[in-house]
C-alpha cells in the first residue's frame, strides 16, 4: 500500500453526555434534552481517534479523513472537535429536531460515502442514546461492502488487507477483509486524545460543508417504529446489613435465591 | 490478634491500590470492621506514636485517666453501637491515626453519639471529671488536629448525619455536622443548588469538620470563605451547654456574631453539631481548560487575563509546577496526560455559569487571545464530562501522589502573589544544600508546589520516602520564617492543629495571641477540648 488510497469517512453523533444521568420528560414520551449537556458519542470519539492514528502511523496511506454528523445545528461543535483532532474536512447535515432511525441514517450515509468517494468507514458500534447497534451493519449492507464490527484492533497488512480483531466470548477473533470496508469500533480500541488549543484554532479554518435533510429528498426517511412510552427503570431496592452468617442465609432463603 | 492485624493491613493495601476510587467501602473479613467511607491511607509508612515522635510534648497530668466508672457512665448514656472500645482485636487505628499517617494517638475509646443531647451529657461529664476530648469528623485534616495526642477520648460526630431541612427558595441548608460533604452536595444537586465549598476529601470529610477548620478548597475563588456563607451553628460548649444559632438569617445585626468564633476554632472551644449554610444555585454548564505556561510570571499574567476576560464565570484558577505533575504521572501511569512535552508550569481553569453557549464563547475568545499573546504555550479543553473529570484529576491527585512513595511534609501558606512560588524554589535549594534530595536512600524526592492562585494560597509539598528529623529540621522553622518575612500566613486553609501550634507567632502578634488564649480560657477553663493543639 504505497499510494495514498484511503479515503476514510467517520460518521459521528451528538448524544447526551455519557456522565449525565438521562431523565424521562414529564409526558413520558422521550428523554429530557433541555438544559442537558451533549457531547460526541464515546464510540464515535474512538472511531475518530482510530482514523487519526491510522493517518499518523502511515502518512502515505491516507488521502483524507472526512467527518460527518447528522443532527441539530449544534452538532457542529463536535465536528469542530473532530477537525481539531485530525479530520481534514467535514459535513454537517442539519436534521433540525427530526430523529432518524438507523436505516434512514444508513441511507443518508450511503449517499455521503458515494459523494466523498470513501473506501473505508470507521464508526462507533452504537450510539449511547438509543443503543441500537444497527447503523454500521445496515450501511455495509446497503453498500454491499464487507463489515468488521466491534473492532478492538485494526491492522493494515502489506497485501492490502485489513485485519480487525474482535473481542468475543472466550478470546479474540480476527477477521480479514479488503477495501472498501465498514469498521465499527468497540470500547478498547484506543483511548481518544484531548483536543489541543492550537489544533482547535486551526480547525476553524478547515472546511465544514453544511447540508440539510431536504438535500436527501430522494431518501425515504419515514420512521418504521412508533414510540409508545418511555419509562424510568424500576429503582433498585436498598441493601440491608446482616450481623451474622445465619441471618444472611435466612435472608437469602427469604428472597428465594437459595 | 495477628489475624486481625493482617486483615487490616490487607484492607489498607487494597485501598491503596484502588485509591482513585473515592467512595470505597471495605469490610475486613476477620474483624467485621467497616471502613465507613472513602478514606484510604496514602502512605505506606506505619506511623509512630505522636508521644514518641514528639517527646517534648508531655501529657497534662491534670487530665484524669479513663476508668471503668467513666466507661460505665458513657455506656449508660449511649447504646452499644455508639461506643467503640479498644481491645486486642481492635486498636482503633482508624480513629487514632490521621490521614497522612504522620500522627498516632493512644485513645482507648471512641464515642459516636447519635444525638446532640447525648454529646452534651458526655461533654458535661468529661468537663466535670477533667477527661480530655478530641472531637473528630471525617478525620481528613492535614495538621494532626483531629486525632488524639495521648489518651484523649475520641468524640466522633459521624452518627449525626442527617439533613435537617432545605429551603429551595432561599437556598439555605440546615444539616447535622456529621453529614459527608459529598452527600450534602449530591442532596443539593437534586434541588439545583451547590455546596459553596469543594475539596479533594469530599467523599470523607464532614460538613461540621470543614466549618470547624474553616476549610478553603477549590470553590473559594467563586463563593468566598465559610465565614461568609455559614449563617448559623449549633455547638456543644465545654460545660455541656448547647449553643444554638441555627435560625438562619441572611442579615442579623443584633450583637456579637458568635458563630464566627467557632468557624476555624478546630474544636477547641466547642463541638459543632449542626450547620446552617447559604448555598448558591448550581451552575448548569462547566468548562475546564488545562494550560501549559513557561514561567511563574506567565501564570500571574494568565490569571489577570482570566479575571478580565472570563470575569463572573471564572470558578477556579489552579496552578501546578512540573514537579507535582511528574509525581502525579508516576502515580497514575494509565491516565491519559494532556500533553506530550513537559512544561515548567500548568494552569487549570474552570468556568461555570448558567448558559453553555455564552461560557463557551467567552472561554474560546480568552484562550485564543492568550495563545496569540503567547502567554500560554499549549493547552487542551475538555470536550465532554469524562475529560473534564480527567483533567481535574491532574490537580486533585497531587496530594495523594506526593505521598505515595512514603510520606509528605505539607505546608499550606498564604503569600503575596508575586512571591508565591519563590518559597518552593527556596525550599528545594535548602534541601539540596542539606544533601537530602535524590534517589533512594536520600529521604526527599522533591519539593513540589501547586495551589489556588486566585486566593494567594500555595501548597508546598515535600514528597519523602520516610519521615525524618533531618528533613523536618531543614524545613522548620525555615518555611515559617520565609513566610513571615514576606508577611504571609503559615496556614492559609489547613489550620493549626498539632503541627503548627508552636508557630502561630509567625503569623499573629502578641496581642492577638493573648486575646485568643483568653477566649480559650474563658470557654474551656479546664482545657479539655482538643488539648496540646491550636494555640
Image (spheres, coloured by chain):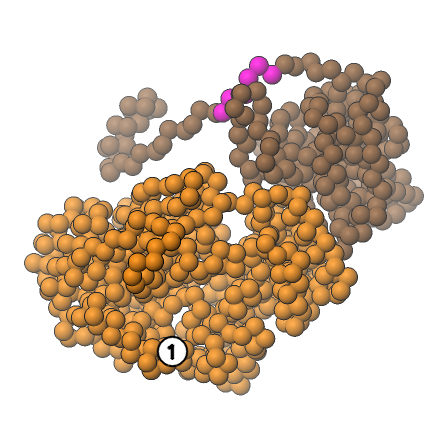
Chain colours: A brown, B orange
Q: Which quarter of the rendered picture does the N terminus of chain B lie within?
A: bottom left
Q: Quadrant of residue A171?
A: top right
Q: Is residue B514 magenta?
A: no
Instruction: Give the image location of residue A12, x and y in percent.
Output: 73, 35
Which residue position is annotated with label 1?
B508
Q: Quadrant of residue B188?
A: top left
Instruction: Give the image location of residue A109, x and y in percent.
Output: 79, 27
Q: Residue furthest front?
A: B254
Whether residue B25 is visible here, answered yes or no, is no
Position of residue B193 relative to residue B441, above or below, is above
Which sits in the foreground, A162 or B367?
Answer: B367
The residue that appears at 72% across and 61% down in the rendered structure is: B370
Q: Is residue A231 magenta?
A: yes
Q: Residue furthest bottom?
A: B433
The residue that appears at 42% across and 39% down in the rendered structure is: B168
The residue that appears at 44% across and 69% down in the rendered structure is: B492
Position of residue B187 relative to residue B263, above or below, is above
Instruction: Give the image location of residue B377, x and y in percent.
Output: 72, 63
Chain letter belonging to callout 1 = B
Instruction: Give the image location of residue A256, x and y in percent.
Output: 32, 21
Whether residue B194 is visible here, answered yes or no, is yes
Per the picture, the main secondary structure of the magenta-coloured stretch is loop
Q: Which residues are magenta?
A: A227-232
Horizontal side of residue B376 vs A57, given as left or right: left
Horizontal side of residue B48 vs A226, given as left or right: left
How many numbered callouts? 1
Horizontal side of residue B170 vs B401, given as left or right: left
Q: Residue furthest left?
A: B69
Which sits in the foreground, A92 or B3?
Answer: A92
Position of residue B294 relative to residue B254, above or below, is below
The residue that appears at 60% across and 16% down in the rendered structure is: A227
Q: Secondary structure at mark 1?
A: loop
Amino acid at each position: 500500500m504505497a499510494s495514498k488510497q484511503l479515503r476514510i469517512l467517520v460518521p459521528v453523533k451528538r448524544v447526551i453526555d455519557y456522565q449525565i444521568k438521562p431523565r424521562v420528560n414529564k409526558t413520558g414520551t422521550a428523554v429530557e434534552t433541555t438544559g442537558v449537556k451533549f457531547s460526541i458519542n464515546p464510540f464515535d470519539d474512538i472511531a475518530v481517534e482510530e482514523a487519526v492514528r491510522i493517518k499518523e502511523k502511515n502518512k502515505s496511506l491516507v488521502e483524507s479523513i472526512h467527518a460527518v454528523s447528522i443532527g441539530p445545528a449544534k452538532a457542529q461543535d463536535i465536528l469542530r472537535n473532530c477537525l481539531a483532532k485530525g479530520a481534514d474536512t467535514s459535513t454537517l447535515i442539519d436534521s433540525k429536531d427530526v430523529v432518524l432511525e438507523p436505516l434512514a441514517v444508513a441511507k443518508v450515509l450511503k449517499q455521503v460515502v458515494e459523494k466523498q468517494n470513501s473506501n473505508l468507514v470507521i464508526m462507533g458500534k452504537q450510539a449511547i442514546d438509543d443503543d441500537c447497534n444497527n447503523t454500521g451493519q445496515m450501511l455495509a449492507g446497503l453498500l454491499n461492502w464487507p463489515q468488521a464490527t466491534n473492532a478492538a484492533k485494526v491492522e493494515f497488512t502489506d497485501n492490502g488487507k485489513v485485519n480487525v480483531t474482535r473481542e468475543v466470548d472466550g478470546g479474540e477473533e480476527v477477521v480479514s477483509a479488503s477495501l472498501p470496508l465498514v469498521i465499527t469500533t468497540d470500547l478498547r480500541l484506543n483511548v481518544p486524545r484531548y483536543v489541543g488549543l492550537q489544533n482547535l484554532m486551526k480547525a476553524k479554518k478547515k472546511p465544514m460543508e453544511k447540508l440539510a435533510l431536504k438535500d436527501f429528498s430522494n431518501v425515504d426517511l419515514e420512521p418504521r417504529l412508533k414510540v409508545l412510552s418511555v419509562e424510568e427503570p424500576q429503582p433498585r431496592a436498598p441493601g440491608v446489613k446482616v450481623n451474622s452468617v445465619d441471618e444472611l442465609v435466612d435472608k437469602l432463603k427469604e428472597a428465594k435465591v437459595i | 490478634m495477628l489475624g486481625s492485624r493482617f486483615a487490616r493491613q490487607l484492607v489498607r493495601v487494597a485501598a491503596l491500590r484502588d485509591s482513585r476510587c473515592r467512595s470505597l467501602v471495605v469490610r475486613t473479613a476477620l474483624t467485621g470492621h467497616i471502613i465507613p467511607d472513602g478514606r484510604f491511607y496514602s502512605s505506606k509508612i506505619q506511623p509512630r506514636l505522636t508521644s514518641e515522635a514528639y517527646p517534648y510534648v508531655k501529657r497534662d497530668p491534670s487530665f484524669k485517666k479513663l476508668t471503668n466508672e467513666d466507661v460505665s457512665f458513657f455506656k449508660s448514656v449511649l447504646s452499644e453501637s455508639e461506643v467503640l472500645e479498644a481491645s486486642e482485636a481492635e486498636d482503633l487505628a482508624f480513629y487514632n491515626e490521621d490521614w497522612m499517617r504522620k500522627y498516632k494517638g493512644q485513645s482507648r475509646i471512641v464515642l459516636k453519639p447519635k444525638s446532640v443531647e447525648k454529646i452534651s451529657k458526655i461533654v458535661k461529664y468529661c468537663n466535670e471529671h477533667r477527661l480530655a476530648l478530641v472531637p473528630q469528623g471525617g478525620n481528613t485534616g492535614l495538621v494532626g488536629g483531629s486525632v488524639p495526642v495521648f489518651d484523649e477520648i475520641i468524640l466522633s460526630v459521624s452518627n449525626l448525619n442527617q439533613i435537617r431541612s432545605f429551603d429551595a427558595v432561599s437556598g439555605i441548608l440546615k444539616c447535622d455536622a456529621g453529614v459527608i460533604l459529598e452527600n450534602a452536595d449530591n442532596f443539593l444537586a437534586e434541588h439545583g443548588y451547590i455546596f459553596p465549598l469543594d475539596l479533594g476529601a469530599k467523599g470523607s470529610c464532614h460538613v461540621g469538620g470543614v466549618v470547624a477548620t474553616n476549610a478553603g478548597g477549590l470553590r473559594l475563588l467563586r463563593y468566598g470563605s465559610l465565614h461568609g456563607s455559614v449563617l448559623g451553628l449549633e455547638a456543644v460548649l465545654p460545660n455541656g451547654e448547647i449553643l444554638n444559632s441555627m435560625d438562619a438569617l441572611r442579615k442579623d445585626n443584633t450583637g456579637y456574631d458568635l458563630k464566627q468564633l467557632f468557624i476555624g476554632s478546630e474544636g477547641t472551644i466547642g463541638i459543632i453539631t449542626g450547620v446552617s449554610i447559604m448555598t448558591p444555585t448550581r451552575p448548569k454548564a462547566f468548562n475546564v481548560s488545562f494550560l501549559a505556561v513557561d514561567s511563574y510570571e506567565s501564570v500571574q499574567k494568565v490569571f489577570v487575563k482570566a479575571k478580565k476576560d472570563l470575569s463572573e464565570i471564572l470558578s477556579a484558577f489552579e496552578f501546578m509546577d512540573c514537579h507535582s505533575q511528574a509525581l502525579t504521572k508516576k502515580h497514575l501511569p494509565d491516565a491519559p496526560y494532556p500533553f506530550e512535552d513537559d512544561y515548567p508550569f500548568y494552569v487549570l481553569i474552570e468556568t461555570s455559569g448558567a448558559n453553555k453557549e455564552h461560557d463557551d464563547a467567552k472561554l474560546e475568545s480568552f484562550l485564543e487571545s492568550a495563545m496569540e499573546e503567547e502567554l500560554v504555550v499549549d493547552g487542551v479543553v475538555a470536550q465532554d464530562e469524562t475529560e473534564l473529570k480527567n483533567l481535574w484529576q491532574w490537580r486533585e491527585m497531587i496530594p495523594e501522589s506526593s505521598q505515595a512513595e512514603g510520606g509528605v511534609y505539607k505546608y499550606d501558606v498564604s503569600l503575596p502573589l508575586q512571591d508565591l512560588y519563590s518559597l518552593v524554589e527556596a525550599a528545594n535549594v535548602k534541601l539540596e544544600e542539606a544533601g537530602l534530595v535524590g534517589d533512594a536512600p536520600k529521604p526527599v524526592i522533591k519539593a513540589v508546589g501547586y495551589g489556588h492562585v486566585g486566593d494567594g494560597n500555595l501548597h508546598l509539598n515535600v514528597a519523602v520516602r520516610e519521615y525524618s528529623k533531618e528533613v523536618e529540621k531543614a524545613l522548620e522553622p525555615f518555611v515559617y520564617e520565609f513566610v513571615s518575612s514576606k508577611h504571609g500566613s503559615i496556614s492559609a486553609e489547613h489550620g493549626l492543629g498539632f503541627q503548627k501550634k508552636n508557630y502561630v507567632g509567625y503569623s499573629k502578634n502578641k496581642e492577638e495571641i493573648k486575646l485568643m488564649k483568653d477566649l480559650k480560657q474563658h470557654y474551656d477553663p479546664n482545657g479539655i477540648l482538643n488539648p496540646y493543639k491550636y494555640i
